[in-house]
Image: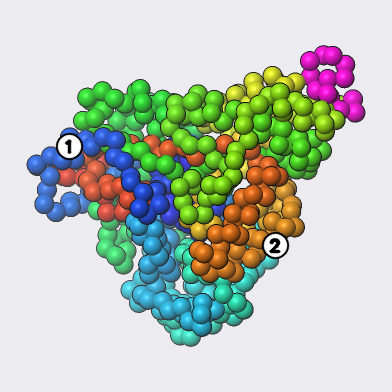
Amino acid sequence: MNFGRLLMPLLAVVLCCVAACGGDGRDSGDQPGQKTEVEHRAADTASAKRPAQPEQGDLLVTGTIGEPSNLIPPLASDSASHEVADLIYVSLVRYNKDIELEPYAAESYEVLDGGRRLRFTLRQDIRWTDGVELTADDVEFTYKLMIDPKTPTAYSENYKLVKQFTKLDKYTVEIEYEKPFAKALISWATDILPKHLLEGEDLMDTKYSRHPVGAGPFKFKRWEAGRRIILEANDDYFEGRPHLDGIVYRVIPDISTMFLELKAGNLDMMGLTPQQYLFQTTTSEWEKFYTKFKYLSFGYNYIGWNHRRPMFQDKRVRQALAHAVSKQAMIKAVLFGLGRPTVGPYKPGTWMYNDAITDYDYDPAKAKAMLAEAGWTDSDGDGWLDKDGKPFAFTLLTNQGNEQRIKIATIAQANLKDIGIQVKIRTVEWAAFLKEFLDKGNFDAVVMGWTIPQDPDIFNVWHSSKAVPGGLNFIGYKNPELDELLVQGRHSITNEERKPIYDKVQEILHEEQPYLFLYCPLSLPVVSSRFMDVTPAPAGISHNLKWWWVPEDKQRYTAVP
């Protein structure tokens, strides 16, 4: 949902997820050491009447452009699903507000044999919301599910590297690897699934995909298709009951409509567009009743070329397209300057970003000359490029309701028209966009966004083995040299070892241009000022969402609907 989400919950550290609206970001935080800027602090937040202790009650009502596809996390690649699931399930380890790994469902963990072996000891006070105890059986079941070839997941590779999984007792598991794996510990930040409910179930046709049972701070209550998903506080949550009674995710497929709902007081939180942030939320009333935040997101937007289409198989063509599209025009027109251009799949300013790469300059004349070298010329004088009697024409696809992506497509369309390329724009509803187009490779080119994991491993998106139906390498890009580097990077442990590997990865992607990498937007979340303890951190603002609270005299909702 990446309107709809705080770019994606902290699971983005573990999984790359398709962003339904990359760029508004609600939970895409800064790296440690980077300053998080709070643009406005609402007057009510600093009120002297603030109670000394958190008070129970009220709901958080937020919006999502994209409805979740599946609430069994391994089966979903969209952030809308993972944002909701992150509050329902628990994992062995998690990232804290400073993006540091810490135990979660595990009481403790040990890294042994130079990183080749992990041992997790689970807490003994965790129960699924149906009352059954969470044990090592559930961890083992989740692992086996992830490596089962019948499980339709895009995230199996991390678990296929496990040499041996051993359940030592009811609360202890040991995981052994053939050789050190950089993401070994991080990979166990994935959600644990309930064995007693999912064992023997057809995962493609189970009620638990839309009626999940977890052990997290909130439990699932109801999913009204196309309208809303309702979570309620888990009274039995092992870290303590959340202060809020529940969270309501309203499905609102249009960001302008969502803003009107926020303005009317029917939403408590959303990610603002740059225009909304700069021009529509600056009055004293807004500053009184809402708090705005601004920080560079862990996400980027791009145009992806389908490498199964003949017109995009020539590297010279893709490089020419990079010269033909103006990123600066997009940042100015789409983001009103609230973003930074990027040359690859990492966040500028982080250790893994390759600062030595020089971006393609906007140069239509050069683009046209490069296309001519590749055989694309206006042979019949009609103003459009053609080759072997076929015009250079394609459809640029994106999801409905995302004004920023539609603007990106419109600017790209105009830029490419200037050099003789015909582009049609098509928008599709989010669920169909994923299922019928991306998963099946049924497109020419797409305007999309990814969340950026805090670990540089991008195997799941870029390795050739993922260029399959339902895989995250849906553009079908294959490069043996890149494959080798991605594998090498996974088995290098220190940042010093990994930095040159991922610098080379970025050099290849820059040279090959399988995507036209555009920009990283600023996250611009806004939250009703009646919510207390909304605290900016490197992990974003929702790292402690389960501990947000509302003073009793400001509470609006008396019951979970």
Nearest to the observer: residue 529 or residue 414: 414
Using the numbered discs, state the Cα–Cα distance from disc 1 to disc 2 in whole angstroms: 54 Å
- Image quadrant occupied by the C terminus: top left
Q: Name the mark nearer the viewer: 1 or 2.
A: 2
Corner quadrant of residue 124: bottom left
Query: Which residues are drawn in magenta?
Result: 377-389
Q: Residues within 10 Å of mark 2 (few under 14, many from 20)?
A: few
Q: Is residue 222 above or below residue 169?
A: above
Badge 2 is on which residue?
484
Badge 1 is on which residue?
44
Q: Among all residues in the image, which is located at the extreme right?
A: 388
Q: Main secondary structure of the magenta part?
A: loop
Corner quadrant of residue 156: bottom right
- Kindly tell me whether residue 112 is visible in this rendering: yes
x, y percent for residue 260: 37, 25
Amino acid carrying label 2: it is Glu
**Which residue is found at the position 75% from the left and 21% from the top?**
420
Corner quadrant of residue 323: top right
Dot 1 or dot 2: first in sequence order is 1
x, y percent for residue 340: 48, 37
Q: Is residue 66 left or right of residue 325?
A: left
Q: Is residue 443 above or below residue 259?
A: below
**Which residue is found at the position 12% from the left and 45% from the top?**
50
Q: Residues within 10 Å of mark 1 (few under 14, many from 20)?
A: many
Q: Among all residues in the image, which is located at the extreme bottom?
A: 168
Q: Is residue 425 left or right of residue 541?
A: right
Give SS at disc 1. Answer: helix
